[in-house]
Amino acid sequence: MTSTVTLGGREFRVVDMGRRTVLLDHYLMRLIRATGIDRVMPMDGDGADTYLARLQSALIDSGRAHELIAGYLLPVGMTEREWTPDIAREVARHVALCDTEADREQVMTLALEVSIGFFRRALRSLNSFPSFLPGERSAIERPSTAAH
């Protein structure tokens, strides 16, 4: 995404994903699940363009694209640490009510950029998961040996 975006006459700064808070991270994960884009899997024969178009369609069809986009935008002058779900709701309301052709096109572009970002993060996370031998369990799955 570009570093600043103007929608409906208001200027927003794109969230620095390297500086996002746990609260923002959980908000985005929850919305990604709510939109269903986490369940859009590549199909046999899908090229990258076809798959991204299906991701974008699922995001738009969910009726929550404006909410997810709002999770990536901050009012100019606000830091990632100042972000709250209330800020996201206010930004989402603003995005949803944009009514010019230029704004609608910008929102569609942002929806595509969110989809591309999700696609890239999903690929990175798939590559970063350790593979375990059958029957081997991670430290999280192993029962604690400490006495209770």
Image (tube, rainbow, N blue to C red):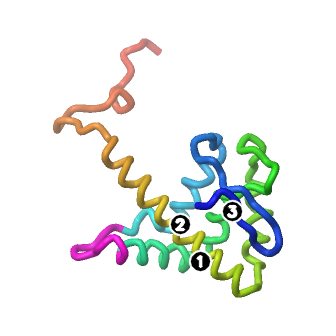
What secondary structure is marked by label 1?
Answer: helix
Q: Position of residue 120 (x, y in %)?
A: 42, 56
Q: Is residue 126 left or right of residue 98?
A: left
Q: Is residue 26 above or below residue 47?
A: above
Residue type pointed to by label 3: Ala
Residue marked by disc 1: 108
Name the front one of labels 2 and 3: 2
* Disc 3: CA contacts within 10 A as few (<14), some (14-19) or many (>=20): many
In whole angstroms, how far apart are the C-alphas of marks 2 and 3?
Answer: 13 Å
At horizontal 62% and vertical 64% (from top left) the residue drawn is 68
* Disc 1: CA contacts within 10 A as few (<14), some (14-19) or many (>=20): some
Residue marked by disc 3: 70
Q: Splitting the image into 4 quarters, where does residue 47 fall?
A: bottom left
As drawn, which residue projects farthest toward the top? 147
At horizontal 70% and vertical 82% (from top left) the residue drawn is 102
Residue 113: mark in rendering? 2
The magenta span reads 41-50
The earlier-in-sequence mark between 1 and 3 is 3
At horizontal 75% and vertical 68% (from top left) the residue drawn is 6
In whole angstroms, how far apart are the C-alphas of marks 1 and 2?
Answer: 9 Å
Q: Is residue 34 above or below residue 138?
A: below
Q: Are marks 1 and 3 in contact (CB under 8 Å)?
A: no
